[in-house]
Image (tube, helix red, strand yellow):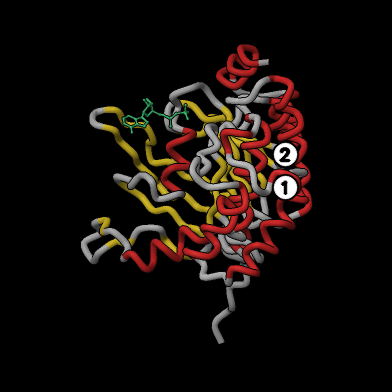
Amino acid sequence: MPPTDTTPEKDAAPLRGSAPGIRFEKVIKRFGSNTVLRELDFTVAPGERVTLIGPSGSGKTTILRLLMTLEKPDGGLIFVGDDPLWHMDRGGKRVPANQKHLHEMRKRIGMVFQQFNLFPNMNVLRNLTEGPMRVLGVPRDEAVERAKGLLDLVGLADKIDAHPSQLSGGQQQRVAIARALAMEPQVLLLDEVTSALDPELVVGVQDLLRDIARQSDLTLLCVTHEMTFAKDISDRVLMFDQGQIVEEGPPERMFGEPSEQRTRDFLQAVL
Ligand code: ADP
C-alpha cells in the first residue's frame, strides 16, 4: 500500500469554523493607471479580528469595498468562506457572478461606514427593520423584536421613533452598528467608524464595538487610524502600504516592537 500523506493542508485550518473566513488570492485592483492593490494575498480566519493600518491612500478602504462587492477586482480571487465572490470562466477570465450568488454572498457581510449612511427619511426602527424584512424576508414582528433587542444593546432603546437628524453623531453610529447587526452578518467590516465623531463620543462607540467583537464569533476586518482601538479590538494587525502588506502580527508586537522601518515611521506619525 502506498504511504498515506497525513500532512495537514496549510490553508485548510483557517477556513473552518462557524463564521466564514476571508481570503484574498493575488488580488489586483486598478483605478485607471493607478494600481492600488498589487497581487495582494491575505487570510482572515473564521472568527478572527483583524485590523488594517497604514497611510491614507494605501488601499485599505478599497479592500473593504471589494468585499462588499462595491468594487470589482482586476485580477485574483476573493473568497468569503469557500465561495469566491466572482467566478472565473474556463479561460481564467473574471465574469460577474450571477445576481443570485452575489445576493447570497452580500448577506454574509455587514459594513459600518465612516459617515453612518443611515436612511435619512426613515426613523430608527425602520432603519433597523427594512433590510431584514426586504432582503432576508424576516416577518415584521420578528424584525421589530430583533431591532428592539439591538437598540437595547447599543443603549438607544428610547430613540426608536427618532429620525437620524435628531441624533448626535455618536448615536447615529450606534444605530448604524445595530443596523449592520440586524442583518445577522457573519463577517463585519468597519471602515474608520469613529473618524467623523466628535472626540468625546469616540470612546463610547469604540467600547461598544470592542464588547460586540469579544462577545460574538463574527469575523471582523477593521480599518482605523485609532491605534488604541486597533490594539483593543484585534487579534492581529496588518500594516499595509502601497497595495501590499508590509508586516503583520499580534497588536502587542506590532505596536511594541515593529520590525519594519515603514511600520515604525507610520506609528511615529500617528501615535
Ligand atoms: P485608504 O483607505 O488606505 O486611505 P483607499 O482604498 O481609499 O485608501 O484608496 C487607495 C487609492 O485608490 C487612492 O489613491 C485613491 O485615490 C484611489 N481610489 C479609491 N477609490 C477610487 C475611485 N473610485 N476612483 C479612482 N481612484 C480611487
Check the picture and name the quadrant holding the N terminus.
Answer: bottom right
Q: Report x, y in % for residue 24.
A: 46, 49
Q: Report x, y in % for residue 213.
A: 72, 47
Q: Which mark is residue 29?
A: none
The relative height of residue 83 versus residue 39 in the rendered view (above or below) is below
Q: Amino acid at mark 2?
A: Ile
In contact (CB < 8 Å): disc 1 and disc 2: yes
Check the picture and name the quadrant holding the C terminus.
Answer: top right
Q: Which mark is residue 213?
A: 1
14 displayed left or right of 35: right
Q: Report x, y in % for residue 143.
A: 62, 64
Residue situated in front as seen by the camera: 62 or 12: 62
Q: Report x, y in % for residue 233.
A: 72, 39
Q: Is mark 2 within 8 Å of ligand 1?
A: no
Mark 1 neighbour class, 10 Å CA radius: few under 14, some 14 to 19, many 20 or more: some
Is residue 75 visible in the rendered image? The answer is yes
Secondary structure under tag 2 reads helix
Q: At 68% across and 25% down in the image, what residue appears? A: 227
Q: At 52% across and 32% down in the image, what residue appears? A: 115
Q: At 62% across and 57% down in the image, what residue appears? A: 182
Find ligand 1 in the image and state its quadrant: top left
Is residue 154 visible in the rendered image? The answer is no
Residue situated in front as seen by the camera: 219 or 123: 123
Q: Amino acid at mark 1?
A: Ala
Residue under label 2, please give it.
233
The relative height of residue 246 versus residue 200 in the rendered view (above or below) is below
Secondary structure under tag 1 reads helix
Instruction: Give the spatial CA distance, label 1 vs label 2.
Output: 7 Å
The quadrant where residue 228 appears: top right
Farthest-out residue, left: 91
Q: At 71% across and 56% down in the image, what residue appears? A: 148
Mark 2 neighbour class, 10 Å CA radius: few under 14, some 14 to 19, many 20 or more: many
